[in-house]
Image (tube, rainbow, N blue to C red):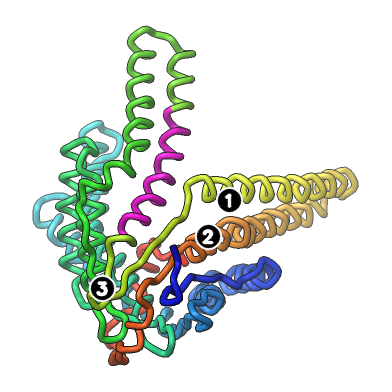
Amino acid sequence: MSSPNDIQGQYRGTRGELFPLAIGVALLTLVTFGIYRFWGKTRIRKYIWSSTVGDGDAFEYTGTGLEKFLGFLVAIVALAIYLGIVQMLLFFAGLNYSFDPDTPQGMLALTGILYLNIFALVPLVFYAMYRARRYKMARTRWRGVRFGMEKGAWGFSARSIGYGLLTVLTLGALFPLANFKLEKYMADRSYFGDARFEQNGKWTALYGAAKHLFIGLAVLVGGVAIGGASQSESLMGIAGAVGYIWLMVGFVYYRVHAFRYMAANRTLGGEITFTATPTTGEVIKIYIIGTLVMGAVIAVFAAIGGALFAAMMSMAPMGNIGLVGVFAVVLYVIVLVLLGAMALVFITQPTIAHFITTFTVHNADALNDIRQRASETGVDAEGFADALDIGGAI
């Protein structure tokens, strides 16, 4: 039950405002061969942050496209040096790309070298994830007070690898442990002004949230195994379809209920508490409606474009076939731009709005005792996240 000392989250963004912004960002990103994406993502974040309101005060995103671009360039140089060192170590170990790919042994060796290079990037991927979150925290303000996050990217990377291996070795049974511990590691190093967040609770409580993940996985693996043993393709197909759908719904269920539990067991400054009540049904409904709308719009657009394409093919002289090809490329690009913009407008924004509007801050009077936090330096503006292509999220 709410009280006068509570703050209920509000979201004031609209599809009519976000859609032209998303279309413009996508087009400028295309014509600049991807360079504008740093400025484009900044513009979209500024819109979403400013649409998020608590107690009449909107959030503010203070990041810039230029610092993201410069961070990306620095990360590219660092990655090139890092991968060069990895290649030198492999060379001294007798592993290089000189193996003959036409022989089974050579192909096996080349595949092994490829995977060694991929695995060498794993620590940097987790490092980039922590740094990206730290950057967004450092560039976010509410009520004029900065958020912040302590250094700890390498510690997060080491823990992510350790908990990841533990999850694999236990066939996913300890996934809730890994998720809870990693989220707690980040939450306990986060601040609003001079007040520190603290994640409480028990990791075993997340098993309730993960139940549909385990059931879906059991149906998928068990059904396919039984169908394979009995040589029943129909059983394998049904089990595969049911298990996959159950697994996807279970993933949404877990994300929603884990978020609810973590929010309910998180404090700020030891006094301020939170409640979150998003529902799995609402999130799934958003995805279904958004997907149907996107599919319908793209189907109509594709039908019109296909008819025009066919007409051009039937009337174009042989010398103008190149123009038909240009039209096909333009049509493909327009479809990509529409898909990206509609996904942001019909899926991402409504999902964000649902989580925000079901989020409540309790004992809000204690916010008045929080003081400003010093501006943080040393954040790399998500450069590594962008360089490793894991920075696509808002």
Q: Nearer the viewer, residue 185 or 224?
A: 185
Give the number of the disc on residue 286.
1
| Cα gap from disc 2 to disc 1, whole angstroms | 9 Å
Q: Which residue ends up furthest to the right in the rendered image?
A: 315
SS state under label 1: helix
Dot 3 alpha-carbon crowd within 10 angstroms: few under 14, some 14 to 19, many 20 or more:
many
Q: Check disc 3 and report its element: helix, strand or loop.
A: strand
Q: Give the labeled residue for mark 3.
A: 197
- Which label was assigned to residue 354? 2
The x and y percentages for residue 345 are 62, 62
Tell me how far mark 1 sits from mark 3, CA to CA. 30 Å
* Region of the chain picked out in magenta, as a range: 243-262
Q: Residue at position x 54%, y 79% from top? A: 50
Out of 346 and 233, give the one closest to the viewer. 346
Q: Are marks 2 and 1 in contact (CB under 8 Å)?
A: yes
Between discs 2 and 3, the one toward the N terminus: 3
Say which mark, if any, is on residue 358.
Answer: none
Dominant secondary structure, magenta: helix
Q: Amino acid at mark 1?
A: Ile
Marks 2 and 3, how far apart in space? 23 Å
